[in-house]
Image: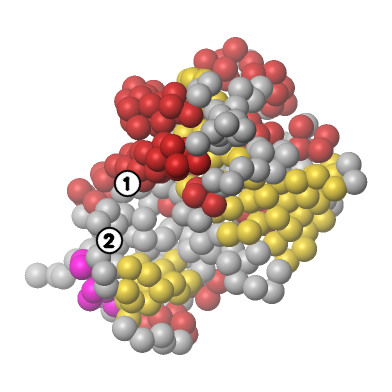
Amino acid sequence: MVFQQRLHYLYEILDRSEQRRFVYFCSECCCILKVSHRLRPVSEVIEALENRCPSCNSRLESSVVCRSTNIAETWSEVALSANSPRRASTREKALFEPASALRGFCFGFPPLDRIVHRLDPAWLAVFTGRYANVAAELLCFRAQLRKEDGGLDSSVVFIDGGNRSDPYLLASYARLYGVHPKKALRRVATSRAFTMYQLANLVTRELPRAIDDYGSKIVIISDMFGTFNEPELNREEAGRVIDAVRRGIREIREERKVLLLVTLGTKTPYDHMVTDSADLLLELGASRSRVTAALVKHPFQKSASSSFKLQELLQPVKPQEGTLQNGKNGTVVQDSRSA
């Protein structure tokens, strides 16, 4: 009888235990390679697996990552070896789609793709700053593209918390890609929240059903705290409502496994209540008529920044026509710190 070793993925854990271990995983597909009590050299994992990920077959010398994190009990004995035949069970494949299947999802805009690289399922991504909503509109359209074209082949659930959704910009992106604007707009289910109580109701009660009804793989909450800026707003009451929204977001992430994108267009005293739990945090501000993008937090990438003209983001060149490889579009500065 041949032993088939089960594969685990970093995003498949639903109930977190109190055990904290060093987890070695592949950044391309999030496959767990080894769990250890002590920090060990990455080279040991690479050698044990002959420099190949057992899930996506990528070269581990450029993709293996170590993180100290809480683990599930099923991970406690993970130590893959190149000598052991391995495959994921049929049930596991049905429940969890490897990140490698969606690793092509990105902005399609070189100055941002070079610092963010990709957006993975089950992430909470937060965009802040003046041009956060512009970047969200671009992803709102690109999510509709086929996977082979860099999209998710999905409809989008869009909650507008600050009355900032821009159907004209979405239609403009559709035209750039040769998609009829009406077709693109039909694949976006938009709901506006004019008060913080409406926002809480949408996130906690309506959103789960909308995700199921539309089969969406991405949810965008635009200007999430746009209704929390009233001068007479009671801070204690606002905190109570935000706690309800955060619980709703946590439940959606755990049960629906969708990419959840939140934008914070205007600064509020409550921003940290969502940025602290974000997997990815991207600041999109303005400086001297240019957009400045700063990658503040990312599960795998180092901090980095990019600068480009606003018009380039409003009318991005399609990837096959662009300059992602030669780096002519915008400037990027890498930070030596680890994300």
Question: Which residue is found at the position 45% from the left and 42% from the top?
Answer: 236
Q: Is residue 93 left or right of residue 253?
A: left
Locate the N terminus and report the quarter of the image it occupies.
Answer: bottom left
Please say whether residue 78 is one of the residues in the magenta stretch. yes
**How many numbered tags mark residues here?**
2
Give residue 233's position: percent from left, percent from top. Answer: 54, 33
Foreground of the two, 128 or 157 = 128
Q: Amino acid at mark 2?
A: Arg
Q: Is residue 208 left or right of residue 99?
A: left
- Which badge, 1 or 2, comes first in the chain's sequence? 2
Helix, strand or loop status at disc 2 = loop
Tell me if residue 160 can be seen. yes
Stretch of the chain drawn in magenta: 73-81
Question: Which residue is found at the position 53% from the left and 64% from the top?
Answer: 300
Q: Is residue 65 above or below residue 183?
A: below
Residue extending farthest to the right is: 288
| Label 1 packing within 10 angstroms: few (<14), some (14-19), many (20+) | some
Q: Is residue 272 left or right of residue 336?
A: left
- The residue indicated by pointer 2 is 16
Give residue 304's position: percent from left, percent from top. Answer: 70, 62
Can you tell which quarter of the image residue 77 is in? bottom left
| Label 2 packing within 10 angstroms: few (<14), some (14-19), many (20+) | few
Helix, strand or loop status at disc 1 = helix
Tell me if residue 34 can be seen. no
